Image (cartoon, helix red, strand yellow):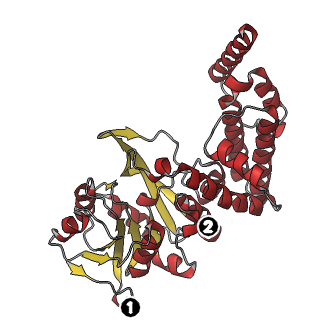
Amino acid sequence: MSVSADLHVSDESSLPVSVLMTTFNGVKYLRETIDSILGQTWQDFEFVIIDDCSTDQTVEIIRSYNDPRIVLVENEHNIGISESRNKAISRARGEYIFVTDQDDVSEPERIKLQLSYLRAHPDIDVLGARVYFIKGGARVEDEMPVLTEPYQIEVALFFARHNLTYSSMALKRKFVREHDVCFRAQYHYAEDYELYHRMALSGRLSVLPDALVGYRLHESNNSKIKYDEMTRNGVSFMRDAYARVLAREVDEVEGYLIWHGLIEKLPQTSTSDLRKLGALTAKVMSAFESRNIDDKLRCDWIRQFCSMIWFDVVERSLQKLGFDALRVYDEFDQLHACKPGVVRKAKALGVCLLTKMKAASS
């Protein structure tokens, strides 16, 4: 194993694959993660690990591996996850860059399958893979349908309905260098999602339907610890993202409505806010339709997808708004391309009846 703090790497000594990981006090799951990378069926890669001044046995565990593919870089002072990831990206020599987090697990065929796909599809710049969740030691499958087409992913990013997960990604180094793919520390705790939006602007993203990465869910996930900061930063970049698509300024109040109602999927408590979300969904749909106006199949998919999003938003608000929510739903005819089935609509009516009965008895 080599240990280096030098970030200058010549492109002349490139490899097929670089696997990147950052660590900070990750001793609990670290061996499982490292073993899953070193045990890949594709063996020709360097494994660059940036340690951000761990105070536990993380570095000792990494050093215990007698594997020449591991390149350990120890930060001189703690710089945070975004800058550590950027440091790893700058250190990579591989034509293809794979990433993992210190507590996630890669299936043995991951590198082989993603590399094979990227080589066969020169138009794709970034390739994710379906993940499964690891919760309390048990495997839980992700039930969200996988979107594989770049235009589908670009639309889905505006509603947090994509399948992109950082630790499942493989990127072409050429794309990374040409478009300065890096994390922005000002979006701390929401930096992954902001990066996805930026990459979708300049490149083509796809996702393999194969479940190739285990994403660990536990109480120390940053999104649970730093909820307020994540929300504030998420609102900031989503305002910019929506402003680009809507071709107008999105103020902070509207930004929080987008984040809570469309990204976090929280129920609405006022018909006014619900109506605003309907208008936003319709405008996003119209904007993406206009980009794909010459492709009927794409336009049909965009209309159906946004219609599904709209009913989901309404359905979540039924317990708060009852029949008023369904009346707002009916106001947006353009978002009825994909209507709920009979069973789902019957359940919605049942919830409305219960809400009305509770209101009458209080």
Look at mark 2 in the image and give the residue it sits on: 198
Label 1 sits on a secondary structure element that is loop
Residue in view at x 52 percent, y 43 percent: 145
Name the amino acid, label 1.
Answer: Ser
Is residue 40 visible in this depiction of the protein? Answer: no
Residue in view at x 43 percent, y 70 percent: 85
Asked if residue 34 lies left or right of residue 50, the reply is: left
Residue in view at x 65 percent, y 25 percent: 341
Locate the N terminus by quadrant: bottom left
Look at mark 1 in the image and give the residue it sits on: 10
Residue 304 rendering spot, x and y as whole percentages: 70, 41
Vertical placement of 242 versus 143: above or below? below
Vertical placement of 113 versus 319: above or below? below
Label 2 sits on a secondary structure element that is helix
Q: Earlier in the sequence, mark 1 or mark 2?
A: 1
Residue 88 rendering spot, x and y as whole percentages: 40, 75
Name the amino acid, label 2.
Answer: Arg
The image quarter containing residue 99 is bottom left
Residue 144 rendering spot, x and y as whole percentages: 51, 41
Is residue 94 visible in this depiction of the protein? Answer: yes
Give neighbour class at mark 1: few <14, some 14-19, many 20+ (Cα, 10 Å): few
